[in-house]
């Protein structure tokens, strides 16, 4: 009995093998072609696989688009890599003797990637997971093809999720524009009328550019573009404002520490930028430690880095104050030269320790990507977090100077050193701590900047001029002035930039600040009373 | 100096000589051939130039292991111009007059090259310049081993306009505000006009060095791309500004399939400082990528890893240019039998080297190379996958034919022309 079964299995196997060789399992055949040489051949294989409509193709295509599809160098056999394990894309069986060195990734180019996106879109449109369906609908929207029309109609009829449905309707309308049928095209334009998306605008314009024969369709399309432009103009204003605020938040963060050291203490610290840079490198070190010892905390790296950067930069600031700056109080020129020298020493030290090349600080997933407000206008996540972070730091600093004993001492010393000293405050110690606080805040700014800028030894230099500008513009020594100064400079910059360009925009802002300082030498918020005389 | 200290000094010198000759018996009699290295090891440009200094030091070491040159040892003389352009000229003078070097490998930015040019011409030195640049120059004393615009920019645009490259019809020219991007974009604009692209379909935008806030520009690029034609970005953004630019692109969700960016100044070294995931599919045009597969390149990478003691160090295009320049100079010195600058220069013309890219590259009488052009797409591991390359090496134009004022200009340092910028030969019979 067992023998008979064995023979049967063997027969079936042989049969299966024979069938496969004569192309009767088109799925296995199409999959095998994915590893073909040349991007054009691979794209054709993707299309063929997608046209089969076989749900088994989904994981294979997804693996391919994520670079997990491997091809054996020796014979072109395919495998899907999943961590350290690998399995056969057709049979899903784990490959026992898998050696990654024998394989190489099936490489993609842009054309192939876009083909893959469209193919996956068509296949996943009926997936049970609404997130997958949404992604699929977007894929179909971006890679429009008239053949998708019946598929989209079927999907719309079956769809229950409101968000996916809206995207499907948009995809349908966008696809209808390509139809040969005039009524379909008109329906498409009507379907796109409510959208406020730059990509929709491109599609509508393309209709006219492709030589639309029908005058009515052309007119409707032009009307739709005009309406879209009006909506976009308003949104653009909002976008400029948000971008200005986010630039302002970066400036605020960079300038806040300077407000304390320069504004409150009157020390011109040219090494201030390097404190920011050291904060950024502290983030890098924390990241490396987390990767080495606590992989589970990777997502929290920036949060862990904040206190580290504060302490490291703050301690360095205190050391700098005790060793150099305290000997130079009241001699601004010498302080300037000395701290400039210190800044070069710090830069070269970091270059010697960490190397001259940029260091990579990865953004955690909750800080990457963007939130789409409306119509292709996006605000990136990292910027939102930086706005919130800078406001939080500002609040913390204001509270610290208002409510704590140290804050009281600090204000007392800066307002009247002699009197404070007479009251028994150890002014030297307060000076050191104040300088440490300013430097520590700079270090925290470095953590935020590591998310949007290079972590390189030159990081600080890019921000020192802007920081001084903000502090002087806002009014020396006034945290509210710094807030208002940073935000208004950010917004002005962002409103000028689209018209004047980045280079001229920056020059115009500088000129405006110079003129402003001519009129009001003490900035937006001048300190009044005795403190102003110091 | 007293007599006893004379004696002591003499003894000391004798001891040193004895000691030295014990270690290198054969060649110690002759003074070494000095190879100057003029790359910034501190300041802004250290990020790129330090690697090139290491490359030359490694090549010198290797040449010494192979028995030196003309029976003499090579010695690398490294100076640090600290990313300070006037200091480049001073250090060049120091190399040529104080150290009396026989050849100099150095410079990165065009402005540093322009600053050493009068010095190297005045003192009749020899400089090998390894970086892709804007062209429009051919000095008697400089060999340009990087790409001229027709060996990088123009093939890249042709690729973007091809079917594989996405048939782009609209172009954004983004650059840092200095001479290289401005000149390159001038050439590109003229080239695009010749391909029938109107001015309305070209957006040109410059940013300051180290620009870090790209929100507005990326949003504008997005809007510019919404005019119904396939759009591509050509980036001559240099140095540190690239990281925030690509981060902003990634965060604003611009994928390479939608708007591809082709960069002329972003190589493996620059990518090492970025999280490359959101960049996958964006392009770069160079004459060499680390991912080129051939035995010479693989051996070179192995040597580089051993030399730097870091198996993750990447190689890049300017390093390859130095490799070509150094090998060519060694060949030319052997051919001339001397390190005399004039003799070596004459021996350079027509010199051929098998480059790391796997092609035979040749030095032409305009002091530029013929090199292959490759387009690579960024991969997740920070390497480039070559998606297109020219059939063979392309000869560099020192003077771009796409700039009207260049009409009739010739760079040719052989008889009868003997000039880098002239419209008539110097010698006429």
Image (tube, coloured by chain):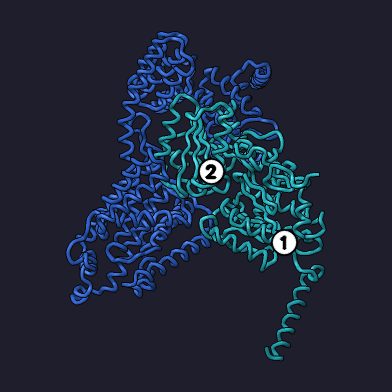
- Position of residue B198 relative to residue B270, above or below, is above
Foreground: B53 or A148?
B53
Dot 1: element: loop
Local secondary structure at mark 2? helix
- Chain identifier for the blue-coloured part of the image: A
Q: Chain B is drawn in which colour?
A: cyan
A123 to the left or right of B426 = left
Which residue in the rendered view is the most extreme toward the front? B429
Mark 1: give few (<14), some (14-19) or many (20+) Cα within 10 Å.
Answer: some
Q: Is residue B158 visible from the viewing direction of this image? A: yes
Would you name the residue on which mark 1 appears?
B102
- Which quadrant of the figure has residue A229? top left
**Mark 2, chain letter?**
B
Q: Nearer the viewer, residue B56 or B328?
A: B328
Q: Mark 2 points at which residue?
A: B181
| Position of the N terminus of chain A by quadrant | top right
In the image, residue A308 sits, relative to residue B174, either above or below, namely below
Q: Looking at the rendering, which quadrant does residue B286 occupy?
A: top right
Are discs 1 and 2 less than 8 Å apart at CB?
A: no
Q: Residue A318 shows which numbered tag?
A: none
- Name which residue lies at 66% across and 29% down: A37
| A75 over B92 or under it: above or below | above
């Amino acid at each position: 009995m067992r023998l008979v079964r064995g023979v049967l299995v063997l027969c079936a196997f042989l049969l299966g093998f024979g069938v496969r060789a004569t192309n009767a399992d088109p799925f296995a055949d199409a999959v095998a072609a994915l590893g073909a040489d040349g991007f054009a051949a691979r794209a054709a294989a993707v299309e063929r696989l997608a046209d089969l409509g076989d749900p088994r193709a989904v994981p294979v295509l997804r693996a391919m688009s994520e670079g997990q599809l491997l091809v054996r160098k020796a014979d072109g056999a395919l495998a899907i890599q999943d961590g350290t394990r690998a399995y056969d894309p057709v049979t899903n069986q784990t490959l026992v003797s898998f050696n990654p060195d024998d394989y190489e990734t099936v490489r993609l180019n842009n054309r192939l990637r876009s083909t893959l996106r469209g193919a996956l879109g068509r296949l996943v449109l009926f997936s049970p997971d609404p997130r997958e369906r949404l992604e699929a609908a977007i894929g179909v929207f971006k890679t429009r093809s008239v053949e998708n029309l019946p598929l989209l109609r079927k999907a719309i009829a079956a769809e229950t999720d409101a968000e996916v449905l809206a995207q499907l309707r948009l995809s349908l309308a966008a696809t209808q524009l390509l139809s040969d049928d005039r009524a379909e095209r008109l329906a498409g334009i009507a379907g796109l009328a409510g959208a406020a998306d730059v990509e929709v605008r491109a599609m509508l314009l393309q209709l006219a550019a492709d030589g639309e024969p029908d005058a009515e369709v052309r007119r409707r399309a032009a009307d739709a573009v005009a309406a879209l432009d009006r909506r976009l103009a308003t949104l653009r204003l909002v976008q400029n404002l948000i971008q200005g605020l986010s630039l302002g938040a970066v400036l605020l963060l960079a300038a806040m520490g300077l407000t304390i050291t320069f504004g409150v203490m009157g020390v011109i610290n040219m090494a201030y930028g390097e404190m920011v840079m050291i904060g950024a490198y502290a983030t890098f070190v924390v990241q490396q430690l987390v990767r080495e010892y606590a992989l589970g905390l990777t997502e929290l790296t920036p949060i862990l880095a904040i206190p580290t950067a504060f302490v490291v930069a703050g301690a360095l600031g205190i050391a700098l104050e005790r060793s150099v700056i305290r000997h130079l109080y009241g001699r601004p020129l010498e302080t300037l030269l000395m701290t400039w020298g210190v800044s070069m020493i710090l830069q070269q030290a970091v270059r010697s320790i960490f190397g001259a090349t940029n260091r990579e600080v990865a953004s955690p997933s909750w800080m990457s990507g963007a939130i789409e407000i409306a119509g292709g206008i996006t605000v990136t996540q990292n910027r939102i977090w930086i706005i919130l972070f800078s406001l939080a730091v500002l609040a913390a600093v204001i509270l610290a100077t208002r409510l704590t004993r140290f804050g009281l001492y600090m204000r007392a010393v800066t307002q009247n050193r002699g009197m404070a000293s007479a009251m028994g405050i150890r002014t030297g110690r307060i000076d050191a701590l104040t300088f440490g606080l300013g430097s520590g805040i700079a270090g925290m700014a470095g953590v935020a900047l590591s998310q949007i800028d290079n972590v390189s030894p030159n990081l600080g230099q890019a921000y020192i001029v802007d920081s001084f500008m903000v502090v002087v513009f806002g009014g020396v020594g006034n945290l509210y002035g710094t807030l208002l100064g940073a935000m208004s400079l950010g917004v002005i910059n962002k409103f000028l930039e689209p018209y004047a360009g980045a280079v001229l925009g920056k020059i115009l802002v500088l000129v405006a600040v110079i003129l402003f300082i001519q009129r009001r030498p003490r900035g937006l918020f001048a300190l009044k009373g005795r403190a102003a005389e110091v | 100096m007293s007599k006893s200290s004379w004696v002591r000094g003499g003894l000391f010198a004798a001891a040193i000589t004895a000691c030295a000759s014990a270690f290198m018996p054969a060649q110690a009699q002759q003074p070494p051939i000095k190879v100057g290295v003029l790359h910034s090891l501190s300041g802004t440009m250290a990020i790129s130039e330090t690697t090139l200094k290491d490359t030359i030091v490694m090549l010198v070491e290797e040449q010494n292991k192979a028995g030196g040159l003309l029976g003499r040892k090579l010695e690398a003389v490294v100076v640090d111009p600290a990313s300070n352009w006037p200091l480049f000229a001073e250090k060049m003078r120091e190399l040529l007059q104080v150290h009396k070097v026989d050849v100099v490998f150095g410079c990165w930015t065009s402005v540093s090259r322009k600053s050493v040019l009068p010095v190297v011409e005045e003192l009749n030195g020899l400089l090998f310049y390894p970086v892709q640049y804007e062209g429009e120059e051919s000095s008697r004393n400089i060999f340009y081993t990087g790409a001229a615009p027709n060996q990088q920019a123009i093939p890249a645009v042709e690729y973007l306009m091809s079917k594989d490259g996405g048939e782009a019809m609209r172009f954004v020219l983004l650059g840092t505000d200095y001479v290289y991007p401005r000149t390159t974009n001038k050439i590109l604009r003229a080239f695009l006009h010749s391909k029938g692209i109107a001015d309305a379909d070209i957006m040109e935008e410059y940013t300051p060095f180290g620009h870090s806030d790209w929100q507005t520009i990326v949003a504008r690029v997005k809007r510019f791309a919404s005019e119904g034609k396939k759009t591509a970005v050509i980036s001559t953004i240099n140095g540190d500004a690239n990281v925030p630019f690509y981060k902003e692109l990634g965060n604003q969700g611009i994928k390479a399939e939608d708007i591809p960016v082709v960069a002329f100044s972003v190589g493996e070294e620059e990518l090492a400082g970025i999280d490359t995931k959101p960049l996958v599919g964006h392009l770069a045009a160079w004459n060499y990528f680390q991912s080129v597969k051939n035995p010479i390149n693989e051996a070179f990478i192995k040597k580089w890893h051993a030399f730097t003691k870091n198996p993750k160090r990447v190689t890049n295009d300017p390093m390859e240019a130095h490799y070509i320049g150094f090998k060519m100079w060694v060949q030319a010195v052997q051919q001339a039998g001397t390190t005399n600058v004039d003799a070596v220069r004459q021996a350079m013309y027509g010199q051929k080297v098998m480059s790391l890219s796997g092609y035979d590259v040749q030095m032409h009488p305009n002091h530029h190379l013929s090199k292959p052009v490759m387009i690579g797409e960024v991969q997740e591991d920070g390497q480039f996958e070559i998606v297109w390359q020219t059939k063979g090496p392309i000869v560099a134009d020192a003077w771009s034919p796409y700039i009207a004022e260049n009409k009739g200009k010739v760079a040719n340092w052989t008889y009868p022309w003997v000039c880098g910028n002239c419209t008539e030969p110097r010698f006429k019979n």
